[in-house]
Amino acid sequence: MATLTSALDPQSFSYISSLVRRKSAIILEGEKAYLVESRLTPMVRELGLLNISDLVTELQKPGSQGLNQRVVEAMTTNETSFFRDIHPFNALRDKILPGLIQRRSKEKAITIWSNACSSGQEPYTIAMILAEHFPMLKNWKVRLVSSDLSNRILDKARLGCFNQTEINRGLPMNFLLKYFTKDGSKWTIDQGIRNMIEFRELNLVEPFPALLPKMDIVFLRNVLIYFSPESKTEILNKVRAVMHKDSYLFLGGSETTMNLNVGFEREQIGSAVCYRPVA
Amino acid sequence: MQALVIDDDPAILLMITSILNGLGYQVTTAVDGHQGWQRLTESSPPDVIFVDWNMPVMNGLEFVKSVRSKPQYNNLPIIMVTTELEISQLALTMDAGVSEYIMKPFAPIMIIEKLQMVGVLT
């Protein structure tokens, strides 16, 4: 078996960051070299190569589109966990959903979008909150759309199967007991919860699918930090165009729409910060 | 802030204590449920308790039942430290009054998350 040689050379880093930027508009600046190493070394090992420079050589060969896509997906997959940063979910449960249920009582429809959902913990969290606290919505048309750039990670999300570390992060005990079944060393979320979610591939920098519904709640957390200000503006404008006037946008804890002219105003709900489209 | 950590595994006891010390907690420790009960009742209630499931003399479940039998400890957050094998008994611990669980092995960040989940850390 080949012995891995050392770290990432500048030319390989430059190639990888250009590839990722071209395919996803995500920016990998110099200080992210460690991330490139950590995310791609397993792939190098799996392919029996010596180093990332060899991987870059493979990426330039004819017929390597699949490998290129794998590299982009490896670099863009987000860390996630159940009930991550809990406050938006408390806001959802305590204020947002009760308010929407009142305002949508005629059409009896609510649509929620979890962007860059990765392995699914965020949409599954939302689904469990709906099941646990809003059983009356069973007779409503509730769509929980969940998207990610990576079809590979979406396949994992669709299975709803999690290891001990993933379960240990953020999942309250009563939810574990109620909505999961242990299967060997893994835990699988109930089929009923899985059925609540539409998983679909979506690249934020490409045109959104024409049939994307108008949204009442959008989660776009810890994704925009990787984009240039121009790309952020473009993405937020596109997201805003598919949001109802009285809808809600959640970003990551350290993210904001401030300094971007994208037509949102900040609103505090309990300990959560969200953004509402400006009329 | 005060915490009580009860575990017969010295490594786990040290790990949780170190993390809690780093968060500003003063930590009292015990090596079994009986000693834990003594530590609890001989001073003012801590802000949180971490208790192992599987211990000699008095196990975690028995400890929790004793704690919840006293009204003054009704709202005291208790986090059960458990292994994957014991997780099937989680329903018992929930009925007994455990607030949350944490599965071994765990990373330090998970302690912080569990403290947030039981409302002792914002």
Image (cartoon, coloured by chain):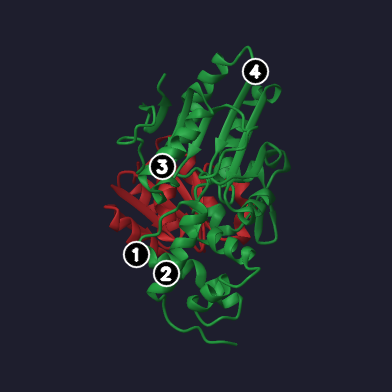
Chain colours: A green, B red
Total numbered labels placed on residues in the image: 4
Q: Earlier in the sequence, mark 4 or mark 1?
A: 1
Q: Closest to the observer: A165 or B87?
A: A165
Discs 1, 3 touching: Cβ within 8 Å: no
Say the numbered circle drawn on residue A232.
3
Upstream in sequence: badge 4 or badge 2: 2
Q: Nearer the viewer, mark 4 or mark 1?
A: 1
| Discs 1, 2 touching: Cβ within 8 Å | yes
* Residue identified by numbered label 4: A108
The residue labelled by disc 2 is A13
Q: Mark 1 belongs to which subunit?
A: A
Q: Of the residues under marks 1 and 3, which one precedes in the sequence?
A: 1
Q: Amino acid at mark 2?
A: Phe
For the residue carrying disc 1, how many other residues have a C-alpha within 10 Å: few (<14), some (14-19), or many (20+)?
few
Task: Looking at this view, name the residue that lies furthest to the top.
Answer: A106
Spatial CA span between label 1 and label 2? 8 Å
How much space separates mark 4 and mark 3, taking CA atoms? Answer: 32 Å
Label 3 packing within 10 angstroms: few (<14), some (14-19), many (20+): many
Check the image and report above or below for A54 versus B41: below
Label for residue A30?
A: 1
Q: Amino acid at mark 4?
A: Lys
Name the amino acid type tagged 1. Answer: Gly
Instruction: Name the quadrant containing residue A91.
Output: top left
